[in-house]
Amino acid sequence: MKLLMLGWELPPHNSGGLGVACYHMAKALAAKGTDIDFVVPYSAGHKEIDFMTIHSTSRRIPGGKYSLGAYDHMSIDGMRKAQKQYVRHVEKIIQANPKKHEVIHAHDWLTVEAGIRAKELTGAPLIVHIHATEFDRAGGTRGNPLVHEIEEQGLLMADKIIAVSNITKWMIVKRYQIPANKIEVVHNAIDVSSMPEVNQDIETYRYLRWLQDDGYTVVSAVTRFTIQKGLLQLLRGFAKATTRYDKLVLLLVGDGEQRDELIRASAELEIADKVFFTGFVRGRKWRDAYGLSDVFVMSSISEPFGLTALEAAHHSNALIISKQSGVGEVLANILRYDFWDERKLADQIVAVASSSALRDELRNNIGREYARLNWRDVAQSCIQLYDGLRRGVAA
């Protein structure tokens, strides 16, 4: 199988879960014998990745967490320039070997124009893989009309669409009037072997560790600070919880355009002494945040999947997940609430914090659940789709 995969990021130059999903999906596909050309919009430098060929569309060096990130709309003009350059480079790859690729697999709106052009040049079937729609990124509102137009064009031109959850599938059906039978749901997974072990001493957050030893419950969220993630609702729900159960602290891991707004909100809610902002972290600080946390909250207004919930489960967190998050489709031993229901969120935080029996039950049961999810199954589902499309083209 010769596959042209179009993505916008790979670790360690990822600004969110898209790059992580692309990496593990491609690795699992390669393990099953798939020959992958993977295209990224910057000078890659991924010397450690030997299971596929990475093509860089420019000499641009990833310059920080917002440098043309997959979730960054702050510079749409710069993004459009990068996308056009990306399309031209994909054309060159195909012109160098026009008969090589049997299937084109494009991830999210950023790459669909290149995917459509590749389909035109090769005649190969196009799969558009939706990890998030513009409605998700805009927190349920319309968002950027140009992005909608590109997204819609990709969905219409795709031979098959992969959605990361049923929530996303029905978002595509409802918002873009795409036939349901054109969309396959393939949930994301987790590669446990790639997760670093937690330092048992957890030196990164010493003050929080001291509070934990004094009986405090550490509630956490690892996320981008954007409207999509429902963090203002999380702060308000957490504030309500602290009026009933004092020994709570909230660890917010990440960064984004809402950072200053969230800091102000924590002060206005009179919980600034209980809310800790780490900034954007990787490596040991990222790992130790999960390891320290007792309760992980995914408060998203619209979350197609939510890989961080699986990462939190791996680190023995009890999970509280908004009903608007797709990861809830593959996990049962979690507490759920509507993102806007701050009172219910507060009830659930207090319930987990005040009952060690409930907390331990959630932790132990979720540990058995998330272990069933693996990227090998994701890769097998993709290969079945590839084979079906190739047979259709041959016919």
Image (cartoon, rainbow, N blue to C red):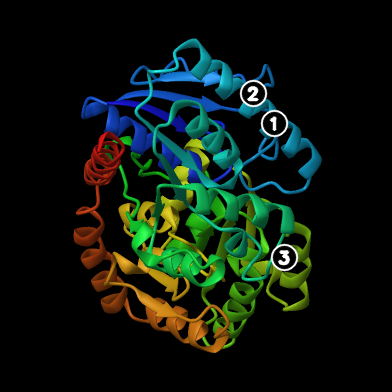
Q: Quadrant of residue 28?
A: top left
User: What amino acid is labelled 1 in the image?
Assistant: Lys
Secondary element type, mark 3: helix
Front in this rendered view, residue 1 or 10: 1
Say whether residue 11 is visible: no
Residue 129 in the image: x percent, y percent? 44, 47
Q: Is residue 376 left or right of residue 203?
A: left
- Circle 2 is placed at which residue position? 88
Residue visible at 35% across and 44% down?
200
User: How far, Cα to Cα, is label 1 from label 3?
Assistant: 35 Å
Secondary element type, mark 2: helix
Dots 2 and 1: beta carbons under 8 Å? yes
Residue 390 in the image: x percent, y percent? 28, 36
Residue 84 badge: 1
- Circle 3 is placed at which residue position? 262
User: What amino acid is labelled 2 in the image?
Assistant: Arg
Please tell me which of labels 1 and 3 falls first in the chain: 1
User: How far, Cα to Cα, is label 2 from label 3?
Assistant: 40 Å
Please tell me which of labels 2 and 3 falls first in the chain: 2
User: What amino acid is labelled 3 in the image?
Assistant: Leu
Q: Quadrant of residue 293?
A: bottom left
Residue 87 in the image: x percent, y percent? 62, 29
Residue visible at 69% across and 37% down?
68
Front in this rendered view, residue 117 or 184: 117
Q: Is residue 277 left or right of residue 344?
A: right
Front in this rendered view, residue 377 or 104: 104
107 lies above or below 229: above
173 lies above or below 36: below
Q: Residues within 10 Å of mark 2 (few under 14, many from 20)?
A: some
Residue visible at 34% across and 28% down?
102
